[in-house]
Amino acid sequence: MRDWGMMTRRQAAVRVGTLLLGAGVLASAAAGPATAAEKIKVAGIYTQPIQQKWDARLHQALDKAAKAGEIEYVFSEKVANTDYVRVLREYAEGGAKLIVGEAFGISREARKVADDYPKVAFLMGDPFKPHGSNFAVFDNYIHEPCYLMGMIAGSMTKSNKIGMVGGYPIGEVNRLFHAFMAGARSVNPKVEFKVNFIGSWYDPPKAKEAAFAQVEAGVDVLYAERAGVVSAAREKGIIAFGNVNDMNKEENGTGVVVTSALWDMTSAINYAIAQTKAGTFKAEDYKEWTMMAKGGASLAPFYEFEDKISPDIKAKVKALQADILAGKFTVEINDNEPKSTF
């Protein structure tokens, strides 16, 4: 559970919370359930620009639904936490049936808004439990592909030292680092880790400097949880692994990024839209919709590294991925702050 005092970081770069919260507001007090073919108005509310990769995942999923003719999509970006409740109420009053956004710094306040608009569906990025009848929550759970990435990373390091640069030591990040570390150790018990957090969701120069320091300490593989790390890896001539989006193709990572742990909110958003249209939307935890079994998380292609990864490791990754999807293997969720081991 997250400390409320920690929420200041969310106001600065609330990427995880920002995008996830924008998925659900039903605003019709009098109208009944919509038909499957009928468009409903859906609002997204983001604390960061929609170009910011975390928020972008929510925006892209909603934009897909709009282009498919399922919804009328409106959104607001760069909404400060101090103004968030006002914008929530405006969309609820303005006919939005589903509101998608984040409540990571204003969870109590957002729940009060949901109570005032019981006919509107709210899908919010939030570390706490669902609330009432219409406040559903989600968080970022891409730890499964992170474990698979770790297996590859553990097999490719020559120094047995891997560096990891993150934004903040919070649950959404910690669980990814722990899964990555566990995956690496599963194939290489000798591997050690250097872990740093830069205290920002978006400061590429700072992330780059942290990565440089890790390389000086002997790491030859980097986990790029933050932007700027891939650039450092390129300059130092080492490999990296990406996070949330496909950093090989989207962040100039060709020849550097072996693969990335991807987050896709499409399945979760489509489910929320369908439930809203059917009048069956309820307060529930969308955690499973952000995991591999339901299409919320995946491992990016290996691209030019396809032949540089050992066939044995690729076979193990493929087999374990199948076990994860079949429910035969569970990647542990550990939200505690990870520590350097050397």
Image (cartoon, rainbow, N blue to C red):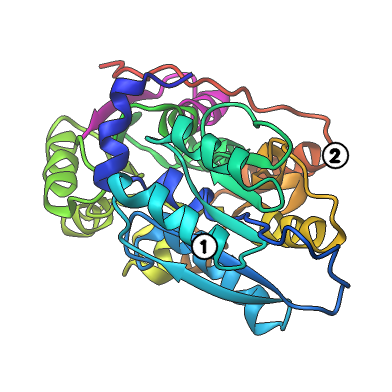
Q: Amino acid at mark 2?
A: Ala
Is residue 267 highlighted in magenta? no
Q: Which residue is mark 2?
A: 326
Q: Which residue is at 32% across, 39% downward?
A: 10
Task: Pinpoint residue 175: horizontal percent, then vertical percent.
Answer: 49, 28
Task: Pinpoint residue 74: horizontal percent, then vertical percent.
Answer: 51, 73
- Does residue 221 appear in this view? yes
Locate residue 341: give its quadrant.
Answer: top left
Mark toward the start of the polypeptide (2 vs 1)? 1
Q: Residue furthest front?
A: 30
Q: Nearer the viewer, residue 299 or 79?
A: 79
Per the image, label 2 sits on a secondary structure element best described as: loop
Q: Nearer the viewer, residue 8 or 309?
A: 8
Is residue 182 highlighted in magenta? yes
Per the image, label 1 sits on a secondary structure element best described as: helix
Crowd class of label 2 (few under 14; some 14 to 19; many from 20; radius 10 Å): few
Crowd class of label 1 (few under 14; some 14 to 19; many from 20; radius 10 Å): many
The alpha-carbon separation of the residues under discs 2 and 1 comes to 40 Å
The tag on residue 91 is: 1
Establish if 134 lies above or below 30. Answer: above
Q: Quadrant of the C terminus?
A: top left
Q: Which residue is at 57% across, 74% downward?
A: 73
Q: Which residue is at 40% across, 66% downward?
A: 76
Q: Which residues are magenta?
A: 178-197
Q: Which residue is at 18% across, 53% downward?
A: 204
Instruction: Name the side, left or right, on which 27 lies relative to 212.
Output: right
Locate residue 211: give its quadrant.
Answer: top left
